[in-house]
Every structure is written in structure tokens, then in C-alpha cells.
Amino acid sequence: MTVQSAAERLLELGDAGTHPASAIVGIQTHRGTEVATAGRASLQGPGTVDVPLSREHLIDIASITKVASTTTIIMRLVDEGALRLSDRVGAFLPGFTSGEKDRVTLAELLTHTSGLPPWWPLYMEARDRDSAIAHVQRLPLVTSPGTARSYSDLGLILAGAVVERVTESPLQEAYRTFVADPLRLRSRYGPIPAESAAAAADSDAYEYAMIRSGRPFPVPFAAESFDGWRDHPVRGEVNDGNTAHAMSGVSGHAGLFSTVDDLLTLGSALRGEEFVSEAVLREFSAPSRIEPSQAIGFRRYALPVGGQQITLLGHTGFTGTWFAFGLDREFVIAGAAMRLYGTVGRLPTAGDDASLELPDLVGNDPIYEVLFDAAVDTLADGPAPATSEAAER
């Protein structure tokens, strides 16, 4: 599968009415970089014009923020000796104490083993960053720390808050200082000018339906009680509700806008020893004892190529994104299919029972599978990797 055919295949996923509006795929190997686009960054409609997607458009990378920003900053802070993965979270966030919270470590936040619940609509109870972060600290743990993996946006919100305490700077400035400026990236937290971005969603209809339906996480709120829902195309604003409505667009778990080229640059930098040391990369890439497919911040992926298992570190994002880089092969992949745009529609009208159902979307798994196949095909076309210490990570 070529890079261009992978981008075009992403647009074909799903049934009529659920096809992603835009797609982009980028792959970097020792042979160079190839990026292909398909679809529209903005669809023609009332007050909007049809704009083809280009590789220059910034993408709302959603939960890839967890690794491209928060985890990467922490890697650099660990390298400098300013942080340790064994540090207790409560040492930096005094509100996160009492009971079993006293034992939660930074590593447990990043491996989703802290015991925090997966999600909570913070904007229902907090409208600014400080109160939202304080509210996360007060939420009860749902499991004992270090006993189970439960993927949690809330844990990465707190990890981002730890970064702010250690660096004594807002998270967006820490990102610029530790990541964007050293690597000369255009990536940044939003909001950003709409014309520079690919639209990520039609509206807040999906999260509205999450509250109304109680799926996948039951919450004790009525969607109608929140007056901040967006009923317009989300372009240049972060899609994630907590980040957009409660955290001013900047969080440890979401909010970063990036080009695919910037993600390829980041993946390449993380493989080298100048940006982060070999020792730190080895520490962060080690599999969790609770869930071996989970590393520190990153997910571990195994690609079967030529009778070998090639290990990648990476992450997916709710908007339809994936980013990964090779530990034992010079390889980086990044891609996106904007699955919430042109598909979820406007907010439902009052009393519309359809709002009790989540909008029908292309799943993240089919998007990942197309990108996974493109990665396998690209690696199969290249030479076998030389033996290196990286293969032992």
C-alpha cells in the first residue's frame, strides 16, 4: 500500500454519511519522507468555502497530545534530573493527597494505573483551568494505584499540571521551550486561526450525546444544563470538551495542533540521543508490568515484518489520528482521518430522542488498521535493520 493509496483508503472507510472528510498520511524512513493528502480541510456550506486538505494544515491531534507534548516534556525533564518517574504526584499537587492518592506516582499517571476514572465532564462543574485541575484532584480513585490499567484523560491532565509546577510556566510555554523551539516545529496549542487548520468536527454533537446517553461513561448531569455547546464547525479550536470548555484550550491530554511533518520530525528526534538520551528512551519504552502493550505515556505496537517483530512507540487520538516511531528501525508514521467532520452534524434540537444515541462514526480501529498496513508494507520494502542496542528496549 502506497502512502497516497492509504490516504485515499481512509476517505473510503465507513458507510454513506460516515466517510471522513479529510485524510493525511506521512511516513519517514532512511530513504526519505513521503506525505499524501486527500479530502477537504473545510467543506463548502453556509459561510464556508471548499478547501482541499494540504500538508501545511494543522491537525487537532487529540490524545496524541499525551505523548507529543506531556510525555515528551517529562522525558526531557527526567533527562535534566528535574523529575523522576517515581516522584509522588502529591509532592507537586497538594490537592491530590489523602488515602491512597498519597502513593500515586508520576509513572502511574503516565501508564494509566493511578486509579483515576477514565473521564469526567469537568466543564459541568468548572469553567477555568485552575478549578478544573483542582476538581480532578478531588475526584475519588476507582481502583488502588498500581493494580490495574484504566485509560484516563484525567491522569494526563494532572501530568500536565505537574509539568507546569516543575517548569514554573504554562503548559503551552513549556511545550514551546522543551519541544517546539528545539525541533523548529510549527505545532502549538490552540486556538489557532481557522484557515490554518483542518476542521475536526461539525459541532459538539458527539460529546452532547455522550452526556445525554450516559455512554460510554455514566455521569449525573443533564446535557441541557450546559450552555457552552458549540453548534458550528470546530476548526482551529480543540474538539475535546474538557480542553475547550474548561481548560482554555490547553491540557496535558489534548489541545495540540500539529502538521504530520512535525510529528515525523518529533518521532525521528525521539529515536536519537541528542534530544533525549538513550537511557531515558529505554526507561520510557519499557512495557508496563500490568499491561505490556503500555509503556510510559506511549503505547507499544508490534509490526510483523519479514518474520520479525518491529516495535513501535506511539499513540492514537479521538479525532482519528495515529503517530508512532520505531525503536529498532528508522521509521516514523503519522496519519489522520477527520472522522467527526461531515459526519456528526449539528446539535440536536430540544426533545430530539436521537440525541440519546451516539452519532455513527468510523471507528478509530479501522483508521489505525489502514495506517498499520501502510507501515507494514513500507517496512517490508526496506532492508532488514542492523542489530543495535535499541532492539533490546
Image (spheres, rainbow, N blue to C red):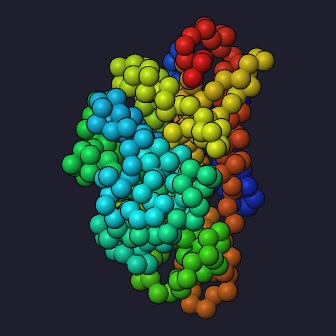
Q: Position of residue 288 (x, y in %)?
A: 60, 39
- Image spot of residue 75 (x, y percent): 39, 34
**In the image, what residue occupies the spot 35% across and 20% down?**
274
Q: Is 383 rendered above or below residue 281?
A: above
Whole-percent x, y for residue 367 in the image: 66, 46
Seen as rendered, the residue at the extreme bottom is 351
Residue located at (61% from left, 91% from top): 351
Please name the residue shown 73% across and 61% down the image. 16
The quadrant of the picture occupied by the C terminus is top right
Q: Taking the image as drawn, is residue 342 in sight? A: no
Judge left or right: residue 286 versus residue 272. Answer: right
Question: Which of the pair 328/338 is nearer the observer?
Answer: 328
| Residue in front for this viewpoint, 162 or 300 | 162
Q: Up-down: is 92 above or below 276?
A: below
Question: Residue 389, percent across and down?
Answer: 55, 13
Q: Quadrant of the N terminus?
A: top right
Total labels drawn: 0
Report the front residue among 176 and 46: 176
**Residue furthest out toward the left:** 168
Query: With 23 as the anchor, is 62 left or right in this view?
Result: left
Taking the image as shown, residue 175 lies to the left or right of residue 343, namely left
Q: Name the residue at the right extreme.
A: 307
Question: Measured along the vertical axis of the image, is residue 231 above or below residue 36?
Answer: below
Going by the picture, which residue comes out furthest to the front?
A: 99
Looking at the image, can residue 146 be seen? yes
Residue drawn at (34%, 29%) of the image:
79
Figure check: 94 above or below 24: below
Q: Give the left or right position of residue 1, taking residue 99 as reference.
A: right
